Every structure is written in structure tokens, then in C-alpha cells.
Image (tube, rainbow, N blue to C red):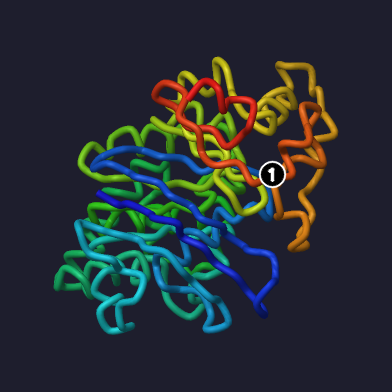
Amino acid sequence: MLELCDLTVRFGKEGSANAVEEISLKIEDREKVFLIGETGSGKSVLLMAILGMLPDSAAITGRAVLDGRDILNLPEKEMRKIRGTKIAYIPQGSGEGMNPLLRAGYQIGEPRVIHQKERMAQAIRAAAGQLERFGLKKEVLRQYPHTLSGGMKQRSLIVMGVMEQAPVLFADEPTKGLDPARILQIVDCFAKLKEQTLLCVTHDLRFAQAAAEKICVLYASQAVEYSEKEEFFKKPLHPYSQAILQALPENGLQVSEGFAPPREDADAQKGCHYRRRCRFCSEKCEEKPPMFEVGTRKVRCWLYAHRS
């Protein structure tokens, strides 16, 4: 189990706006939780903070407890043991992070060599089988990254993450740059991860609807809604959640004022972060709302204070 307790990340001096603010989230073993929200809401920063991959300029508070152990303040030597063996990571960026001087097969197999002490030949054979699940031919293993398309490199990174067989898998925009047919392959692969816990960042609401079990919505550094997938897409609670679903094509592309990018200054983070764009805003919203429990769901909005 992975549990986040008031995890906060700030860049810059005291008083600067938080990149991630007081995120508390409990992810049970083998659950698939998707983080959604627009660019700048803190999704990717949250993953990087848990993995200990942010620069020294990041001030991190709170806890990230993995199997009963807080991993936020572990020495780098200990975190290297966590990455790959306990938490595998699929980065975003269509594969630009791949080393241009090494063949794809070497890079895909290397994590198993390091973390599972396999021989490279054995790791590459395992990689060949995984590539087929994502519509890639084994010839990719002999190619250099510059000869692969962006989508092929992105799928290679996904294979690299799945190959490590860590109990927890972080995926940051795994469908970025992929066409609909390839996205369906990713959905199918994630559905087969029966023994792994998945925490996935995505802008693709349709991908989240197909592959997630639970949805966590982030807005301007805060989690504003946490819900079972079916309940979320049937009836979102937070005004921001309602706005992003109304903007889907099948809902008429009803882009509301609330869909505008959030302000980044610290003053905007006083009170409800969404209040300046919310059609339900009242004087009460000048106070920062907590997460209210509404049945099995959680929502950060004063509209639900009387229902919790």
C-alpha cells in the first residue's frame, strides 16, 4: 500500500505558491488510480517528489509511506533500491529521454539487469515478448532511438517500466503521442497488471475512463475530488470536475470560464483555489475548504459541507 499524507512541494522562497499542496491519498495494493487535471496542477511533480527525483531547490514536507515505511527522507542510496525494485517509473516525453548512443534493446533490458541481476541476453529475450504486447516487432531491440518514431519510443519506455515487475508502477502520460489503436493496446496491457499497483498521470479523460479504477482530480496544486471511476464520470461533484467533463466533444465542448488555467501566485492559493472561476462562489470560499466525505467519495468544496 502507498499512502500520501499532507504531501506538499514548494519551489522558491517561503511564501511562494505551492506546486503540490497537502495531498493525502491512500492507494491500496493492486489499485489503479489516475491523476487528472490540466497542465500545471502538480500531477507530475507529485510523482517525482515520491520518487525523490526533484532538484534540491524543492522543499518537500509530509509523508509518502510505502509498505509502512516513509520514503520521502531516505538517503539517495536507499532510494536507488526503491526505484525499479519497489516502484517502476514510465516517464513522459515520447522517449526523448532514451540514450541516442545505445540500442533500444539494451536500454529496455538494463533495468532487469540492475534490479533483478539477470544477464543482458536473458533480459532482452524477455523484452522481445513484451514488445509484441504493444504492437512492436522484436527488430526494435536492435535499433537506435533516432530511428524510431515518437510513438514507438513512448511504447518502448512503457515496456521498460512493465519489464521491471515492481509492485508499484508510476506512469506519466503513457499515451502521449499515440494514436487511438495504440492507446487501446496500453489500456489492454494495464488491465493485465493484476498484481501491480498503478498510479497514472494523464490528460486523456477517455484513457482514464477505460483504464482507471479510481480518479483523483488535481487543480492548482490540490486534490479536489477523489472517486470511483464510474461515479466520477456519471456525476462529478466538484465544479472543476464538472467543467472539464462538460468540455468533452460528446458534451458539446461547453468550455466554461472555470476551465481557464489557474493563476500561479500565492494569493490565489488562499481560500478555495478555484473560487475565482467558480459559478457557485460565495463568501465562504474565502476560507480554505477541507476534503469532505460524501458517501464513499471525497470532494474539496464548501457546497458539500452539510453532506459529510
Residue 259 lies, with reference to residue 110, above or below; the image says above
Query: How packed is label 1: few (under 14 Cα within 10 Å), some, or many (20 or more)?
Result: many
Q: Name the spot of residue 10 as percent of width and height, x first.
A: 60, 70
Say which residue appears at 47% left-offset and 24% top-offset.
294
Circle 1: element type: loop
Say which residue appears at 42% left-offset and 41% top-offset.
135
Q: Name the spot of residue 209 as percent of width and height, x first.
A: 50, 27
The residue labelled by disc 1 is 272
Residue 110 lies, with reference to residue 167, above or below; the image says below
Most extreme residue toward the right, as rendered?
Answer: 257
Q: Nearer the viewer, residue 165 or 281?
A: 281
Q: Nearer the viewer, residue 186 or 280?
A: 280
With 288 as the anchor, is 76 left or right in this view?
left
Q: Nearer the viewer, residue 294 or 187?
A: 294
Mark 1 is on which residue type?
Cys
Say which residue appears at 17% left-offset and 65% top-offset.
122
Say which residue appears at 36% left-offset and 38% top-offset.
32
Name which quarter of the figure residue 269 lies in: bottom right
Q: Name the spot of residue 74 as percent of width and height, x first.
A: 30, 77
